[in-house]
Image: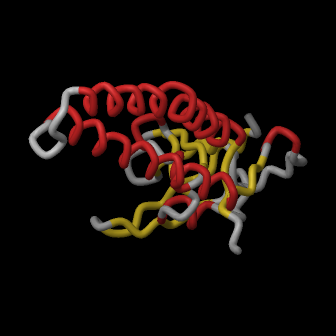
Amino acid sequence: MNKVPMTVAGEARLRKELDQLKGVERPRVINAIAEAREHGDLKENAEYHAAREQQGFIEGRIQEIESKLSTAQVIDVTKLPKTGKVIFGVTVGLLNLDNDDEVRYRIVGEDEADIKSGMISVSSPIARALIGKEEGDVAVVQTPGGEVEYEIVSVEHI
C-alpha cells in the first residue's frame, strides 16, 4: 500500500476530528435515532430519516479518516537535516521574477492543502517545480496563463 505524506499538524487535525466524530457526534446521532423511533411510524418520520442520513455521513467520514491515517507517512520536518533543499513539509519563500511579488508556501499533503493559508499540496504544479531545488535556484512553474519563474529566497524547517 502506498504511503501518503502528511505533516504532524495534519495528522493531529485528523485525529482530533476522528475523536470528535466517535466521542461526540456518533453518540448524539444514535440518541436522536432512538428518540425518533419512540415517535412511532418510521416511514413518515422525518426526524428519523434525517438522523439516519446524518449517521451515514458520520460513519462514512470516520471510515475515510481512519483510511487516511492508516496510509499516512507522518513527516516531522523539524527533525530532518536542514540542507537548504525544498522537501515535503518545508516553508518556502519565493520571489516572482515577473512582478517582484513575494509569497510563502508550506508544502503539505493532499488533505492539508489550503491556498488561503499558504499551504500547497505536494502534488500541485508549483510544489512539483520546487521539490529538490535549493535557496537561490529559479523554478519555472507551468500555469494556465503561461510560465512563471520563481526564485527560491528561503527554505525553512518550521
Above or below, 139 against 156 in this view is: below
On-image quarter of the N terminus: bottom right
- Image quarter in which the C terminus is found: top right
Q: Is residue 104 left or right of residue 90?
A: left
Nearest the eye: 23 or 112: 23
Whole-percent x, y for residue 6 in the image: 66, 51
Residue 72 left/right relative to 116? right
Q: Residue furthest left?
A: 44
- The reply, left or right, for residue 87 in relation to residue 63 is right
Q: Residue at x 53, y 46 (%)?
A: 112
Instruction: Look at 59% across and 40% down and name the residue there.
Output: 14
Residue 96: x percent and y percent?
46, 49
- Residue closest to the eye, 2 or 42: 42
The total number of labels drawn is 0
Q: Give the residue drawn at x 55%, y 43%.
A: 105
Residue drawn at point x = 41 percent, y = 69 percent: 142
- The part of the image, by quadrant, that contains residue 134 is bottom right
* 63 horizontally vs 87: left or right: left
Question: Is 148 placed above or below 102 here?
Answer: below
Q: Nearer the viewer, residue 90 or 14?
A: 14
Query: Looking at the picture, how far across and down is residue 146, in whole percent?
Result: 32, 69
115 above or below 20?
Answer: below
**Residue 59 image point, x, y percent:** 46, 47
Looking at the image, residue 156 lies above or below residue 97: above
Colouring convention used in this rendered image of the protein: secondary structure
